Image: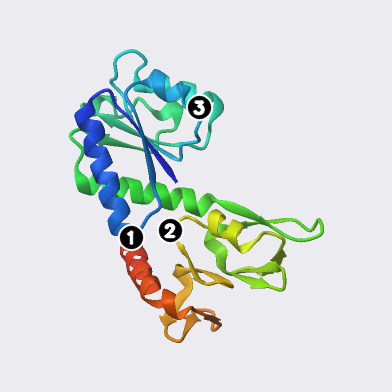
């Protein structure tokens, strides 16, 4: 997931980088960070940004104008405005701002904002499953686990089970949201549905899946971070 930071003040950019890195480390989130010092520089970027921290009061192309240009081509980017004045906090409704943060940025407010932004992106993400033209869209949050079976994969969801031509490595990239863990070469599991970790993983639907001995400690650490992150 790519996080963009656009502010013409270097001290603010550096502080947000620090907060992102701290969040990334404590929550085991796979975040990449890219900084911009102006709206013009941001608009020129061709990389798809998932979450954008955008200063409203920049020199040149200000944050509101920058957001308007973004929305001409990108409806899905999550925009969190940065502002030094509460009076600007109603100005972003036209560009569907996700949230506002007052500068200097409070760490707890930052954590709450980025956590909710990631949750919002994740819950609305979907994946394509199916074989031989039988295509379905499933929400990532509904996937319990993905299993490799005889040169294809099986996707077990809350609403049904589907076969897929997507490889395990491809699924690992698709499910790179911080909610899933590759517990075995043949299994990727949604940590939301894990009840118990032992020699096998007990899921809350009564099923059990294999777990690699070498992955147990990493999985337990990831589950703790996942529970902590989603308890907020």
Q: Would you say the residues marked 1 and 3 are in contact, meaning their CB atoms lie under 8 Å apart? A: no
Q: Nearer the viewer, mark 2 or mark 3?
A: 2
Q: Mark 3, residues whose alpha carbon is within 10 Å: few (<14), some, or many (≥20)?
A: some
Numbered disc 3: secondary structure: helix
Name the residue carrying label 3. Answer: 71
Mark nearer the N terminus (1 vs 3): 3
> As rendered, which of 230 and 8 lies closer to the eye?
8
Q: Position of residue 40 (x, y in %)?
A: 40, 18
Q: Is residue 85 left or right of residue 47?
A: left
Q: Residue furthest front?
A: 214
Q: In terms of secondary structure, where does tag 2 sit?
A: loop
Q: CA distance from mark 2 to mark 3?
A: 27 Å
**Quarter of the figure with the C terminus:** bottom left
Q: Quadrant of residue 162?
A: bottom right
Counting from the top left corner in percent of width and height, residue 22 is at 25, 50
- Sort mark 1 into few (<14), some (14-19) or many (20+) by Cα contacts within 10 Å: many
The residue drawn where x is 37% and y is 67% is 222
Label pair 2/3, CB-CB below 8 angstroms: no
Instruction: Determine which quarter of the picture holds residue 6.
Output: top left
Residue 210 placement, left or right of 160: left
N-terminal of the two: label 2 or label 1? Answer: 2
Q: Which residue is mark 1?
A: 229
Q: Residue furthest bottom?
A: 199
């Amino acid at each position: 997931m790519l996080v963009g930071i656009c502010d013409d003040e270097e001290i603010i950019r550096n502080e947000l980088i620090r907060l992102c890195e701290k969040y990334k480390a404590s929550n085991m989130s796979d975040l990449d960070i890219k900084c911009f010092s102006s709206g013009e520089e941001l608009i020129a970027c061709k990389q798809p940004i998932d979450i954008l921290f955008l200063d409203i009061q920049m020199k040149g192309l200000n944050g509101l104008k920058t957001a308007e240009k973004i929305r001409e081509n990108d409806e899905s980017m999550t925009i969190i405005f940065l502002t030094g004045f509460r009076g600007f906090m109603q100005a972003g409704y036209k560009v569907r701002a996700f949230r506002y943060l007052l500068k200097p940025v409070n760490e707890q407010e930052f954590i709450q904002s980025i956590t909710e932004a990631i949750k919002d992106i994740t819950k609305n993400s979907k994946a394509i499953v199916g074989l031989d033209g039988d295509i379905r869209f499933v929400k990532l949050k509904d996937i319990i686990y993905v299993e490799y079976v005889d040169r294809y994969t099986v996707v077990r969801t809350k609403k049904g089970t589907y076969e897929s031509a997507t490889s395990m490595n491809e699924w690992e990239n698709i499910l790179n949201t911080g909610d899933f863990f590759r517990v075995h070469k043949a299994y990727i599991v949604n940590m939301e549905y894990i009840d118990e970790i032992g020699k096998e993983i007990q899921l809350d639907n009564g099923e059990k899946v294999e777990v690699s001995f070498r992955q147990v400690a990493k999985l337990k650490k990831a589950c703790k971070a996942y529970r902590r992150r989603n308890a907020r």
